[in-house]
């Protein structure tokens, strides 16, 4: 009998039907991987399926392009409206990210860094936008794609600027005794080749992944605990936490976009001008 | 190169990790080879030590 009830409940239980003390005996629908991160195909062409995270990425790219198009397609000497906002964004990236990391000689990379920063930021903001409610960067492939772009750029620049051998020689510190070099050189080279790109991608991915789950836990709990009784108090607590954590995620989203861009600037700056 | 403290912070962070991974990996390979499992954790500890040493050596003098 009990097994029948559980089996029945498993069929009827969805995130929207689960309630504390409900007749269907549904448990709390805990969010997790892969259930909270898997989306069915919106449409498919052959073996290629197009799903919601991809759609969000395309929309975010379109938003960034449209915004900067509106801001700078017909620039005026005295900025108004969108141009004002756009200049604020570009100047922020230039003065807070590019100049401290690369100096004036890095100004050619301003378009790259601006688009990187705003694309990641808008992608992350999708986490708390109603209907979208999913940060595409919590699918590991998206940060990896961005990382590959950055990795390719700074390695190319480093090898072009310093030569292939010179690039690797500049990775290890110069003017140190040979036995110390023998110990530290593999660590340095491993850091440049593997650890840097890996941490760059994982940092963004893990933050958005954790943020999505964090918000889901309390949003689902608010719904699950809502009932006419004492449960309402717990539901209200969860709701307050949802609001607080949404504000917290708003901070994290901007922070992660900032960190990704500032590290990109640091790596490109390091490739242009080797450390000594 | 234009350096600031947060910049150095991230470098140190990845430096420590790469030291641990390199010498841990070396330890794992040797342990796998010689069938002495304990070499793997020893390699990791040595890696952490070398990572700390490297950070002090490179950044401590600035």
Image (tube, coloured by chain):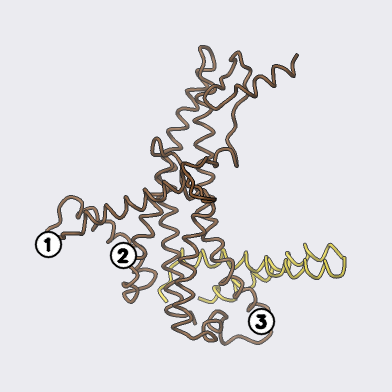
Chain colours: A brown, B yellow
The quadrant holding residue A195 is: bottom right
Mark 1 or 3, nearer chain start: 1
The quadrant holding residue A106 is: bottom left
Q: Label 3 belongs to which residue?
A: A180
Mark 1 is surrounded, within 10 Å at the Cα level, by few (under 14), some (14 to 19) or many (20 or more) other residues, namely few
The quadrant holding residue A126 is: top left
Picture residue at 59% right of the left edge, 72% below the top = B56
Name the spot of residue B25 as percent of width and height, x first: 72, 67
Q: Label 1 belongs to which residue?
A: A77
Q: Nearer the viewer, mark 2 or mark 1?
A: 1
Q: Decide: marks 1, 3 in contact (CB < 8 A)?
A: no
Picture residue at 27% right of the left edge, 52% below the top = A66
Give the SS element for disc 2. helix
Picture residue at 63% right of the left edge, 23% below the top = A11
Give the SS element for disc 3. helix
Q: CA distance from mark 1 to mark 3?
A: 57 Å
């Amino acid at each position: 009998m009990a097994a029948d009830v559980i089996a029945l409940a498993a069929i009827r239980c969805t995130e929207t039907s689960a309630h504390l003390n409900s007749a269907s005996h549904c448990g709390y629908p805990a969010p997790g991987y892969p259930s909270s991160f898997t989306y069915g195909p919106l449409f498919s062409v052959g073996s290629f399926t197009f799903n919601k995270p991809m759609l969000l990425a395309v929309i975010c790219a379109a938003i960034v392009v449209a915004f900067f198009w509106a801001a700078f397609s017909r620039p005026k000497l005295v900025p108004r409206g969108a141009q004002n906002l756009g200049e604020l964004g570009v100047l922020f990236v230039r003065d807070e990210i590019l100049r401290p990391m690369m100096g004036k000689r890095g100004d050619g990379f301003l378009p790259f860094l601006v688009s990187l920063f705003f694309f990641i930021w808008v992608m992350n903001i999708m986490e708390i936008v109603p209907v979208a409610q999913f940060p595409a960067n919590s699918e590991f492939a998206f940060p990896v794609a961005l990382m590959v772009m950055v990795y390719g750029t700074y390695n190319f620049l480093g090898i072009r600027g310093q030569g292939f051998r010179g690039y690797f020689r500049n990775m290890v510190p110069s003017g140190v005794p040979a036995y110390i070099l023998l110990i530290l050189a593999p660590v340095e080279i491993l850091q440049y080749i593997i650890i840097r790109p890996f941490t760059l991608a994982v940092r963004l991915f893990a933050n958005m992944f954790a943020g999505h789950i964090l918000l889901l836990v309390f949003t689902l709990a608010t719904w699950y605990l809502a009932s006419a009784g004492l449960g309402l108090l717990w539901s209200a607590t969860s709701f307050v936490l949802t609001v607080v954590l949404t504000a917290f995620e708003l901070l994290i989203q901007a922070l992660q976009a900032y960190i990704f861009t500032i590290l990109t600037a640091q790596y490109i700056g390091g490739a242009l001008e080797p450390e000594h | 190169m234009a350096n600031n403290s947060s910049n150095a912070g991230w470098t140190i962070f990845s430096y420590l990790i790469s030291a641990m991974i390199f010498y841990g990996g070396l330890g794992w390979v040797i342990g796998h080879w010689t069938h002495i499992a304990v070499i793997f954790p020893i390699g990791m500890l040595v890696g952490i030590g070398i990572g700390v040493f490297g950070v002090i050596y490179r950044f401590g003098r600035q």
